[in-house]
Image (cartoon, rainbow, N blue to C red):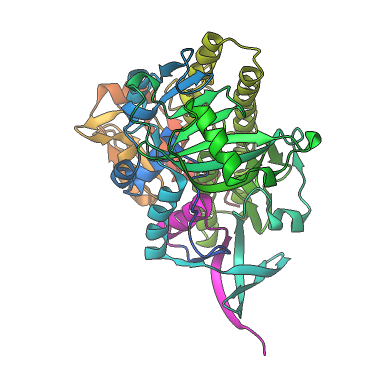
Amino acid sequence: MEPDVENVETLIVGGGPVGLAASIELSRHGISSLLVEKHPGTSLFPKARLVSTRTMEILRAWGLQDEVERAGMPREDVLAVGVGTSLSAPDYLRKAAAIAEDAAQSPTYTYLCSQDILEVIMRGVAESASDVRFGTTMTDLRVGPDGVEAVVESGGVATRVRARYLIAADGARSGIRDRLGIAVTGPPPLGHMVSIMFDADFDFLPPGRRAALSFVRSTPGGAIEAVDNRRRWIMQTGYDPANGGSADDFTEEYCLAAVRSAIGIPDHPVDIVGVMPWLQQAVVAAEFARDPVYLVGDAAHVATPQGGFGMNCGIQDAHNLAWKLAAVLRGEAGPELLATYAEERRPVALRTVDESLVNAMITFQMMAGRLSMHEAIERQAGRRGSEGLVLGFHYESAAVIPDGTPEPAPADPYRTYVATARPGHRAPHVWVSPGVSTLDLLGPSFTLLTAPGSGWARPAAAAGVQVAEIDSAEWAEQYGVGATGAVLVRPDGHVGWRTQSADFAELAKALSVILVRP
């Protein structure tokens, strides 16, 4: 008996944060999707914790900022890093991130909300607007020039799914990427790692020894990470197969000893909650797309955990891709627009993975004793702030119209973000009224930002573009336009076109270029 056939516009394989982000964004653009995830539920392990400023801005646009902040950990308590022989050792040092310096660059800011909690929040939003099926595995896939045909199974029941596009959010060991024969590039695996989740009371530690992340040179060495900042923690450590090490070594007895060594108190009460082996890598797929299949998240790039970039980079992949798929499916854009996904996101992924590797090398040097505790804390704390990386990236593709202005060149492009409305960059944040940012004026469509009385409202309406008139000298200066200029922001919040003139006919032309219309 042939399985039932279902037709959707987009099939998403993988129900982690990136797949859920793709589902949410497609729904915002009115595109039908089916998300399938082989596991029966969301992650039980907090694989990621840091939500970057840019991802928080996306969550704010989805109306989730407040919920995530209620579920996460207070910024002032946890955006800090520590180093020491153990959490209790006399040589332990702690240094906090520069919140006051970075917070003004966005209406929100970096937050810590563990992945197991974030996925539950995102799943609720995705399920409210689209078809999301956990406990469902893709067992067969055929790719053709006009779409994909897949077989998905749940509870012994098979269903044939036809979709115009497939989004592969199936993780670092992506079966879809392997099926397409897409290689990954990067160094060999950096280490065989184990995450030990445990329950313990850290109230005995004074405030100066409490941090979201502490590196300890205990036996075995590793990192202690806050999960809920109350009783739930994770120790990240590793083993070396070349020396006979194995994930099987991590018995409950061994894990208890490792955690207590990291705490620095041999008999401290500890309960082991779970153990998860994983491979530390820094690789990027050679291709991000083979139409009609698009790789996102760990299927496209795997960063080291140092810096907390992986999940965030993946969510922004989905944010970039969704509006382009929607525009093509609605017939508003030429199919060549989809080529700009890889053009824009792969360079960002390469830089992100490289920066995560720099962070990992600092950690390796510290754990090997090649850095003093003071050198280690300065380098680790200096890399905790990364707004230049997470906000300052920009796109160059057919979907961006250059205006000839130079790219900002800060001395430290990893650490320092320079706000600019230069085409290709994220539209800068400016408060336009109490509690309302320029970013809050943007939606799932193109938005034209301009000054009141500039004359752009009528041509924008004729072009089907949302318009927001901003009466603010700070905005005009930040965005580089005068009383007659305008800035066209794409649905992903990046500037597509900017003009200082009042040549209204240029708007329709700019849209055609950005949408790569024939």
Q: Residue at the location (31% across, 34% down)?
A: 438
Between 333 and 409, which is closer to the camera in this rendering? 409
| Residue 27 can be seen in this image | yes
Q: Position of residue 270 (x, y in %)?
A: 45, 40
Residue that extends furthest to the bottom in the rendered view of this protein: 1
Q: Judge left or right: residue 146 versus residue 198.
A: right
Residue that extends furthest to the left in the rendered view of this protein: 434
Residue 29 belongs to the span the image colors magenta: yes
Above-or-below relation of 507 to 378? below
Residue that extends furthest to the front in the rendered view of this protein: 267
> Quadrant where the N terminus lies?
bottom right
Q: Quadrant of residue 57?
A: top left
Q: Position of residue 71 (x, y in %)?
A: 33, 45
Between 9 and 379, which is closer to the camera in this rendering? 379
Q: Judge left or right: residue 164 versus residue 106.
A: right
| Residue 424 can be seen in this image | no
Between 37 and 44, which is closer to the camera in this rendering? 44
Q: Judge left or right: residue 241 versus residue 54.
A: right
Q: Residue at the location (38% across, 22% down)?
A: 102
Between 153 and 235, which is closer to the camera in this rendering? 235
Q: Residue at the location (45% across, 54% down)?
A: 25
Looking at the rendered structure, the number of numbered marks drawn on it comes to 0
The magenta stretch is 1-30
Q: Judge left or right: residue 82 versus residue 470.
A: right
Q: Position of residue 482 (x, y in %)?
A: 33, 24
Residue 119 belongs to the span the image colors magenta: no
Q: Position of residue 383 (x, y in %)?
A: 52, 20
